[in-house]
Each structure stands twice: as structure tokens, then as C-alpha cells.
């Protein structure tokens, strides 16, 4: 089991920045991947950014160059720095932890934090 607690969402004007945080109840050494997903009204949940154990990152094309995922192993916390925000970034952002055990992947989710980009 992994509990994930997110923080840092809010209302920001276009072009602004926000940093999301996600604190995990387990050390990252026991988690195969940490990521951020988002879901806008009427749309499916989509991957925004992912960080794997080897510090490999991948990003959705729509956020490349604007968003950065990082982690602090000592705090068991992963961050999503979001710059140059656009109205289309408005969504509920969810933190994800994936644990791989043999042939099985188990996903754990945070409660979500709302990000609204609007003037």
C-alpha cells in the first residue's frame, strides 16, 4: 500500500507558474515509477509526466519544455514544476505511484488537486 498526499494546486493566470507536491508513505526505493496525470472535464485521464527509478523522465508532448518532474528521496516527495501555464492545462492533477511485482503492476493514486489557469 502507498498513500499519496498532493498539494500546491490553485488558480493562476496564463503564463504563470505553480508547483505541485506529492508526499508518499513509502520510500521511492520500493516504488518503480512516480508520475503526474491530469483529467479535464469531459476528458480521459492522461499522463503528464513520469519519473522512473533510474531517473528517466518522460512528458506529454503538450507540456514538454514547460513542466518538470523531480523528486526528493529524503522526503519521499515528488514535484511537478509547471511554468508558462495555459488555460488548456486546467484540470485535476493526480499523483501516481506504480509498483511492479512480477507480472503485476499496481497503481496508487492521490486524491487530486485542482489547477485552474484563467485570467
Image (cartoon, rainbow, N blue to C red):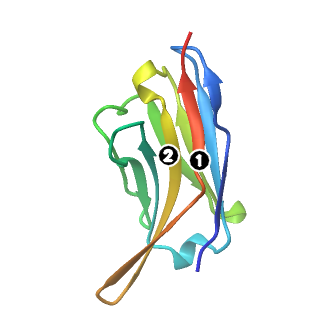
Q: Are marks 2 and 1 in contact (CB under 8 Å)?
A: yes
**SS type, badge 1:** strand
> Residue at position x 64%, y 75% from top?
26
Q: Outermost residue toward the right?
A: 75
Quadrant of the drawing holding the C terminus = top right
> Residue at position x 60%, y 56% from top?
111
Image quadrant assignment for residue 4: bottom right
Q: Is residue 41 above or below residue 117?
A: below
Q: Is residue 103 left or right of residue 84?
A: left
> Residue at position x 48%, y 20% from top?
84
Q: Is residue 43 left or right of residue 111?
A: left
Give the residue at mark 1: 79
Q: Outermost residue toward the front?
A: 42
Question: Disc number at residue 3?
Answer: none
Can you give x and y, in whole percent of width and height, for residue 19 in the image?
Answer: 62, 36
Q: Is residue 28 left or right of residue 66?
A: right
Give the residue at mark 2: 69
Image quadrant assignment for residue 74: bottom right
Q: Is residue 87 left or right of residue 62?
A: right
Amino acid at each position: 500500500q502507498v498513500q499519496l498526499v498532493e498539494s500546491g494546486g490553485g488558480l493562476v493566470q496564463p503564463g504563470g507558474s505553480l508547483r505541485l507536491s506529492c508526499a508518499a508513505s513509502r520510500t521511492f526505493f520500493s516504488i518503480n515509477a512516480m508520475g503526474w496525470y491530469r483529467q479535464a472535464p469531459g476528458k480521459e485521464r492522461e499522463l503528464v509526466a513520469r519519473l522512473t527509478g533510474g531517473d528517466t523522465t518522460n512528458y506529454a508532448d503538450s507540456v514538454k519544455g514547460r513542466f518538470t518532474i523531480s523528486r526528493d528521496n529524503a522526503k519521499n516527495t515528488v514535484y511537478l514544476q509547471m511554468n508558462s501555464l495555459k488555460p488548456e492545462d486546467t484540470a485535476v492533477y493526480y499523483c501516481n505511484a506504480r509498483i511492479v511485482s512480477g507480472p503485476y503492476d499496481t497503481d496508487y493514486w492521490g486524491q487530486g488537486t485542482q489547477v485552474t489557469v484563467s485570467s
